[in-house]
Amino acid sequence: MMNDLFLREARGEATERRPVWMMRQAGRYLAEYRAIRAEVDFLTLCRTPELVAEVTVQPVRLVGVDAAILFADILLPLDAMGAGLQFVKGDGPSLRHPVRDRDGIASLTRPDVGKELGYVFDGVRATRRALAELEPPHGPVPLIGFAGTPWTLAAYLTEGRGSSSYSHLLGWSYRDPEGLSGLLDLLADVTIDYLLGQIEAGVQAVQLFDTWGSLLSADRWRGLAMPSVVRILEALEGAGVPRIFFARGSSHLLPVLRELPVEVLSVDWFVPLSEAREIVGPDKVLQGNLDPAALLGPVDEIERLTATLLEEGAGGPHIVNLGHGIFKQTSPDHARAFVRAVKELGKPR
Ligand code: CP3
């Protein structure tokens, strides 16, 4: 029988206990992931459906989480648009053809996602098959799909790589906001096609990652980043899957984020969940928000902090998660301690 705690909590329905999963739960903190990465590079892994299924299922089997998140990357659609994505070892992602003005937008294509990103959809189908074979207590569990927000994709696309300042994007936003919104609109169009494709292939929820929305004040986020996000979320309305929005460093954005047409808001660890609940109101499910660094501490401290987190989140529907991705230095035993603590303590509300 399917473990559907995650889907029921995401819809705000009553559950026996709160579900738990972790952002970046498939990855380098697991020796089983590193063993696969020793054989293939990151992009090859993303493009090989059987391997995608294997690494997506690993944290379900090895750590016991209540949901799987598709193994892919937010930057894959930029590659499909012609920006030339590469991952150089030790350097993180980079794009061979950054886009920094209106002329640059013309160099991008709106891809046929079925052709250019069909490998992702094949990965979704392979993963659903692999999840269906898991026996209780591990599975089957629901599969979450995802994409980056247009603003966050534009941060990488304008810079050509990760950055601490994103001066190309921010400069463009002050110099020519209409031109930039043309880029964000194109990215939204592609993201809508991409997420609808994931849903058609079998993902049962979707999360939008806004890693760099925190570069903006609440007013600027509303003016610059929000319109393309709302367009994506509204396009998914009829698809019938829960929509999750995650913004890193977003405490100051919560009064705006509460207006988003999503079922679930994922918050980082800078505000306690009880405070986020007061700002957001009763209608949304909250997801989060243990400091990922807490998993580097001792197990008894992880258990104590998880108990506190569960109390903080007890004022409404709550999907337990970290406030951002798990560190690659985390011991799998500590990840398991977190999940186990939720399973033991996350019961009554
Ligand atoms: O387990 C999961 O969460 C699913 C897979 C997933 C990955 N990336 C795999 C990955 C997800 C959801 C992402 C999202 C992502 N990718 C974001 C948004 C979330 C966030 O963290 O804020 C961003 C900004 C990216 C872009 C990206 N991909 C960067 C900056 C890096 C390098 C940083 C690093 O940790 O090395 C990646 C690489 C990446 N994406 C890895 C994984 C497992 C590590 C690659 C490896 O195996 O070497």
Image (cartoon, rainbow, N blue to C red):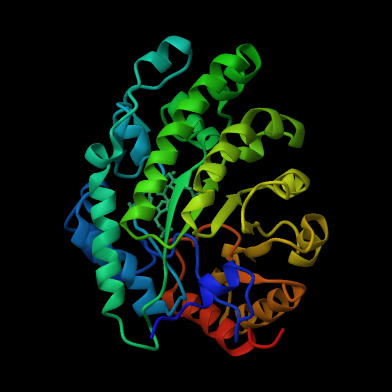
Q: Quadrant of residue 189?
A: top left
The x, y position of residue 42, in whole percent, is: 27, 49
Q: How many marks?
A: 0
Where 286 sits versus 338, above or below?
A: above
The x, y position of residue 95, in whole percent, is: 35, 29
Q: Quadrant of the N terminus?
A: bottom left
Tell whether 61 sits left or right of 328. Answer: left
* Closer to us: 166 or 113: 113
Q: Residue furthest toward the left?
A: 39
Instruction: For residue 269, say whether it is visible.
Output: yes
Q: Quadrant of the C terminus?
A: bottom right
Residue shown at the point (62%, 32%) measured from the top left: 227
The x, y position of residue 248, in whole percent, is: 61, 49
Q: Quadrant of residue 87?
A: top left
Residue shown at the point (42%, 70%) measured from the top left: 142
Tell whether 235 sits left or right of 114. Answer: right
Where 53 sits versus 167, above or below?
A: below
Residue shown at the point (52%, 20%) measured from the top left: 182
* Closer to us: 154 or 125: 125
Instruction: For residue 156, say whether it is visible.
Output: no
The x, y position of residue 269, in whole percent, is: 68, 60
